[in-house]
Amino acid sequence: MRGILFLILTIYGLCAYSSTDFKYQDRSNDFQGLAKALIAEYQYQDFDGFYQNYSEHFLANQVFVKGAERFFVKLGLETDAGKLNKFIPLAAGEVVNFKVGKTPVSIYFENIAKVEKYKIVKSVKGFVANQMRKGSFKKYTLIDLFIPKAHAVECNNQLEEIVNIDDLQAPVDRFNKDYLMAQASGCVQKALSAAWAKTGGLVQDVGSGIWNFIKSPVKSAKKFWNSAVDTYETTKEFITQIDQKLASLGEALGALSLESQIQLVCSLVGSLGSNVLVNVIMRGPLGLGNAMTSLADLSKRVTSSAKFLQLLDQLKSAGKLGKEKVGELINKILTTKNKDGLEKVNSLSSANYVNLTVEYAACAL
């Protein structure tokens, strides 16, 4: 009997010892400034940083990628002293937790050689220590883009009495899809985060929430990093599919300045709506499919309104319309239910009735 009891205790001890799961206490709100600095300034060799804007709703502050190699950095996850300064295997990778002064740092690795891991840890430690020595963190705005929202309808003509369309010029850039997506992916991520924030970051079903444990102690490190990987994969796939869809808009976008191209892509994503964007995160392939269907419908509006969009771009470049007003009008094009009004706007812009076109669009759409 004692032999059986000894065997049971031995097996239990081995299971407890071999368990790789552990708990975190989430203190990331205490390190927001440092996290923004990490996204804005930290680089490692020829790895690419994936997240281009800071949001507390992203589980990882930054993901660095080079081919199949990638590592995730997160600041503010407090864990037991026994889990510090060691590489701990998880389902698909491994994580190391350490402290720089009083700052908890966690790095998750996938497909990275052991020697490289040590180099990354040393590099991140050095960066965090250097930032802490500076003692203060400025507010970073990495990509000065916004997702336009509809404002109150203003029917006052904001243009000069006479505008000659021949005098309007915009710095048109050759359409470069890759560069456009590199610049616009930040607002794509921002749109996903903003949509999730509108739900309060929580869902009814505790088992289905990706970030539902972020506002309270993180009960499972395994769950945390699995969710971080899933969120990264979904966001990357969403951006990739948008990238592929942009090819059909090449002609319409190519007639605009680069700033307007980026503004339009951000508006497209923002116009998908919170429900569609939340489903991208929550429902995986099905949510992505629905989002791409909606994006295809919006893209048709862009191509049919190409002349009006070009006119807005020219007016903005000539100082006749501000960026915010242009964003408002773009948003109207993408969201209006007045299809007859939209056809009228496109017809007026094609006939070069500048003042009338803008005034009608502001009032009728």
Image (cartoon, rainbow, N blue to C red):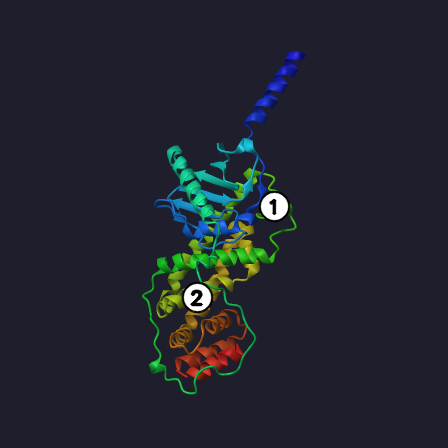
- Identify the residue shown where x is 64% and y is 48%: 205
At x 56%, y 37%, the residue is: 79
Return the residue at label 1: 213
Residue 296 sits above or below residue 98 on the image: below
Position of residue 14 in the picture relative to residue 112 (left or right): right
Closer to us: 33 or 52: 33
Instruction: Identify the element where label 2 is drawn.
Output: helix
Res 263 → quadrant: bottom left
Question: Which corner quadrant holds the N terminus?
Answer: top right
Q: Is residue 198 above or below residue 357?
A: above
Work out how far the residue at label 2 is from the one at label 1, CA to CA, in angstroms: 34 Å
Disc 1 residue type (three-letter)? Phe
In the depicted structure, whether residue 308 falls above or below residue 133: below
Residue at which label 2 appears: 263
Residue 41 coordinates in the image, percent (x, y): 41, 51
Kind of residue at badge 2: Gln
